[in-house]
Amino acid sequence: MASSVAKRALEPGQRVTLAYWAIRGLAQPIRLLLEYVQVPYEDKLFEQGKAPDFDKSCWFDVKDTILGDYPMPNLPYLIDGDLVITQSNAIVRHIARQHELLGSTSTEMARCDIMLEEGMDLRNRTVGLAYGRAGAIEEALPAYAEGLRSHFDRYSRFLGDGPWFAGQSLTACDFIMFELLDQNSLMVKGCLDQFPSLKAFCERFTALPAIKSYLASSRCIVFPCNNQHSQTTQKKIC
Ligand SMILES: N[C@@H](CCC(=O)N[C@@H](CS)C(=O)NCC(=O)O)C(=O)O
């Protein structure tokens, strides 16, 4: 629960910067995490242009200068004091490490790592569908939904009695898993229906007070999950 989170001391007025496209995408679990640990942050948003050009110059014009001589600029990036971090899972681990959200036993730590990587594997499939060519999403959806059932079956067996994916402790992977389950249930209606334990996990996660208040706030991006040129955004699916 948020109240028992070990908070890292920030100087008054100090905040971290999280930068990403103005979408949920890879940044949403990071936003959820920052909200949960109550670290003040700037949610710096780069907005891709609409059709037909889908202009991304707001990022690519500044990509090689905005982070000084940092050699691997990308989105998302996090600036925490003097530290610049790219790679979404590195950012997630950095925040989680500072707030003891990587598991409290070696079993929980391993389980958290497993699900962080599982989450990235499924996400790559999910965005593969979302960014497919026009028309492909309808064609590919039945096979995708079938694959999803198999993933969810494994996840529900891994979760077991939970309450969290790592075990008794809420960890970083829960933020990733929630976002993936939520995005997929917007894309494939009813995909959680056969998996009551995954549904219960989502309900447990969204009942965390800091998460509940973030999801209800105007700070929270509800749509779109993917960038402007994706099929999911073009067709207003999610
Ligand atoms: N493996 C990287 C992937 C980062 C990535 O592909 N970012 C996309 C958005 S999801 C992007 O537009 N990056 C900007 C760029 O390539 O300069 C991560 O997990 O952060």
Image (tube, rainbow, N blue to C red):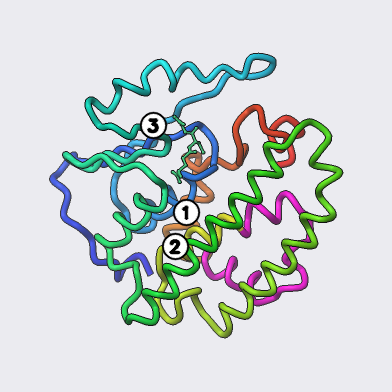
What is the CA distance from the residue labelled 3 to the residue labelled 1? Answer: 20 Å
> In the rendered view of the protein, which quadrant contains the N terminus?
bottom left
Q: Amino acid at mark 3?
A: Lys
Q: Amino acid at mark 1?
A: Ser
Q: Nearer the viewer, mark 3 or mark 1?
A: 3
- Asked if residue 42 lies left or right of residue 15, the reply is right
Q: Nearer the viewer, mark 3 or mark 2?
A: 3
Q: Nearer the viewer, residue 215 or 168?
A: 168
Residue drawn where x is 80% and y is 62% of the image: 146
What is the CA distance from the residue labelled 1 to the residue labelled 2? Answer: 6 Å
Determine which residue is flagged by label 3: 44
Residue drawn where x is 53% and y is 55% of the image: 120
- Asked if residue 115 lies left or right of residue 103, the reply is right
* Spot occupied by residue 216 in the image (x, y as percentages of width and height): 53, 49
Indicate which disc residue 209 carries. 2
Ligand 1 within 8 Å of the CB at mark 2: no
Q: Amino acid at mark 2?
A: Pro
Q: Are marks 1 and 2 in contact (CB under 8 Å)?
A: yes
* Spot occupied by residue 49 in the image (x, y as percentages of width and height): 58, 18
- Asked if residue 213 lies left or right of residue 100, the reply is right
Residue 128: image quadrant is: top right
Magenta stretch contains residue 187: yes
Q: Residues within 10 Å of mark 2 (few under 14, many from 20)?
A: some
- Asked if residue 51 lies left or right of residue 23, the reply is right
Above or below: residue 221 compared with residue 7: above
Determine which residue is flagged by label 1: 213
* Spot occupied by residue 160 in the image (x, y as percentages of width and height): 58, 83
Residue 55: image quadrant is: top right
Magenta stretch contains residue 237: no
Q: Which residues are magenta?
A: 181-206
What is the CA distance from the residue labelled 3 to the residue labelled 2? Answer: 24 Å
